[in-house]
Amino acid sequence: MGEMNVVDGYEQAMAEFPGSTRAIEEGLARFKASYADLTSATLPEDIRSAYADRLYFNDTLHTFSHLEDLAGYMEKTGASLSESSVEVHQVIQDGADVYVRWTMEFKSRAAGRNIHSRSIGISHLRFDEDGRVILHQDFWDSGHALYAHLPIVGFFVRRARSAM
């Protein structure tokens, strides 16, 4: 996607990946299973079965358009966690658009510190005819969930929040 900003990339992806209603239930089941435990040894395979080869994925930290890049990123992410869970609380469907409200909790170590993070978010999903995710845009506060726990960066994140 080059130097395109996140908003432009998301809007372009919505035009490029209109989605299908044909297999949403099957796709949603695979999506939920993939994220239930990011430390699972089968995570890369789970991601490969849940997502299409060509896609738009943005989790507020990274953007991917190819399945293998996403699978590698998720494998690396899972390996950095000691515990992880994503609990889905609500699913709203409007045609081919699916919105998933969730809570994510994980434990990890960074900068010599134990991190226990709990955050909320929503994912906008669209699926192809086979129920594989072709569009995945997360809406969550990654700064609070991740960076606020780090010693130096966290200080500036917390300070910026209090100044607003």
Image: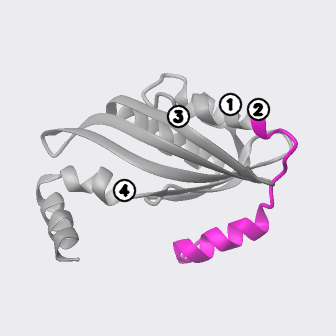
**Amino acid type for the residue under numbered disc 1:** Ala
Q: CA distance from mark 1 to mark 2?
A: 5 Å
**Does the residue at mark 3 contact the one at mark 1 (Cβ under 8 Å)?**
no
Residue pictured at 83% horizontal, 38% vertical:
23
Q: Earlier in the sequence, mark 4 or mark 1?
A: 1
Residue 136 lies, with reference to residue 51, above or below; the image says: below
Of the two numbered discs 2 and 4 on the same chain, state the one appearing first in sequence: 2
In the rendered image, residue 91 lying in the magenta stretch gets the answer no
Circle 3 sits on which residue?
Answer: 35
Q: Position of residue 85 (x, y in %)?
A: 42, 31
Look at the numbered disc 3 and give the secondary structure of its residue.
Answer: helix
Judge left or right: residue 78 versus residue 2. Answer: left
**Residue 102, labelled with which disc?**
none
Residue pointed to by mark 1: 29
Separation of marks 4 and 1 at Cα, in angstroms: 25 Å
Q: Position of residue 123 (x, y in %)?
A: 57, 51
Q: Are marks 3 and 2 in contact (CB under 8 Å)?
A: no
Magenta stretch bounds: 1-26
